[in-house]
Amino acid sequence: MSNMQLCSTGLLAFLVILPHFCWSQYAAPPGDQIWEVEGEIGLVTTMLQDKGLVDILDESRSRKIIRVGLKNSIDVKFILLQHKLTYKILVKDLASYLKEKDGKTIKTRSITCTDLSCPQPLSDAYMTLDQIEWYLKELNISHSSRVNVTSIGKSIEGRDIWLVHIRPLKCRVDGAVWIEAGIHAREWIAPAVILQLIPKLLEDCSRIGYLDIFIVPMANPDGYLYSWTTNRLWRKNRRINNNTSQVGCDGVDLNRNWDYKFGLFASSNPCSETFHGASGFSEPETKALSDAMIAVSRDYNLLMVMAFHSYGQFILHPWGWSTEEAPDTPMMISRATLWANATKKRYGTVYKVTSTTVGLYAASGATDDWAKAVLQVKYSYTVELRDEGTEGFVLSPNQIVPSSEEVWDGMKILLTAVGPGDYIYL
Ligand SMILES: [Zn+2]
């Protein structure tokens, strides 16, 4: 079904109450381009990003693929020239590129879903924010004996941040795990995969059933919505930053806003994609998440925290702020390796096990560092899902099913290994 058909069908039903709900999934600011910088880059692209002139799209150590807005392109060219660097244009008009990509995407949405409602996680399309919320509310009703869906707070634009608590199947309880997805708006595959895992977790009758599982499938609802309506590659939340009249200078990078080693390796420039915000936990989203995690940590034996992102295919362990070894690093590597080996089996997808600073780059104020340092959880991870850069953040929806299947293979092993079956893997 085409976008137009979807919109038309929806309009028939919702014309009166929601006349504006047809939106483009693949919008981009006019004139945005994607460049590949060539030569010895060093920290030049990081510096350009800190200045708010580019958006680094390269989720690898090389950091050479950048998004450049029309208004900054002359400045960026000049600075690259100063550093004797050249570049080639990979995408001349991002808006057209995304539109064309969307046109090639086969859309076969379930007939039981509209853009506003959906009773189950979609496996062949990314879900709208409304669909996600609809599903979570359905889940709360249909599985009321084991599932509690509650709001842990509001986003800066007043949207609920939902927490799904799956209670243990068994009488004996061994501990709890916390799973976060969607803190970076454009990384659509992360919430999509986590939503796919919820029914699998509910159906599983193995040792996973001894755990309390807490899941935030959508940590940044405002940003996610904005990535659907206005800018597919939006990353931050939707705080309107004062003292900046420039386009693109709004938002805080929520994964640089956690109050541990705040501001060390993140930008103080509101125009930067990695702007850390005014202070640690200045943003209602990170405040809500951390308060809820503190409560879980107080009331349960919190064994593990996992934050799902894309892309690059990594399972990262702390620290992000230092190359020093975090406590429990050998155990974190051991369990991450179990996850990566199990994940690889089905389709051969390789996930690299490394620390954030060693494998990627220094970044402070992230969920995993805070959980490790402040909550002192034994196992703390950031997972970067598919792919390795072919499609990057705009991963095709046909990747939802294989990504979810392989991640589930890994989670079955990992949830057993960090919980009741810990002794088996010593
Ligand atoms: Zn991310």
Image (tube, grey):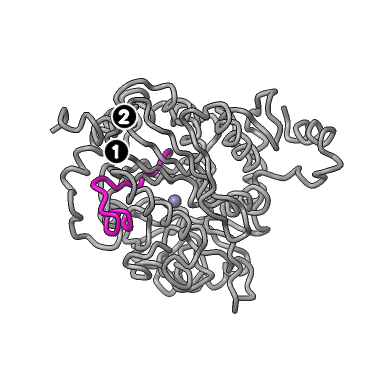
Q: Residue furthest bottom?
A: 243
The residue sitting at 85% across, 33% down in the picture is 12
From the image, which quarter does the N terminus lie in?
top right
The amino acid on which the numbered mark 2 sits, given as a three-letter code, is: Tyr
* Residue 99 painted magenta: no
Cβ at disc 1 under 8 Å from ligand 1: no
What distance separates the C-alpha of mark 1 from that of mark 2? Answer: 7 Å
Camera sees residue 148: yes
- N-terminal-most mark, 1 or 2: 1
Residue segment shown in magenta: 369-386
Residue nearest the observer in this picture, 91 or 149: 149
Looking at the image, residue 342 lies above or below residue 333:
above
Q: Which residue is mark 1?
A: 175
Measured as percent of width and height from the top left, residue 294 is found at 37, 54
The amino acid on which the numbered mark 1 sits, given as a three-letter code, is: Gly
The residue sitting at 54% across, 43% down in the picture is 394
Looking at the image, residue 48 lies above or below residue 306:
below
Q: Residue furthest front?
A: 171
Question: Is 362 left, or right, of 11 in this rendering?
Answer: left
Secondary structure of the residue carrying tag 1 is strand
Camera sees residue 343: no
The residue sitting at 43% across, 21% down in the picture is 203
Q: Residues within 10 Å of mark 2 (few under 14, many from 20)?
A: many
Q: Which mark is residue 210?
A: 2
Measured as percent of width and height from the top left, residue 256 is found at 41, 62
Question: Is 88 left, or right, of 116 in this rendering?
Answer: left
Q: Residues within 10 Å of mark 1 (few under 14, many from 20)?
A: some
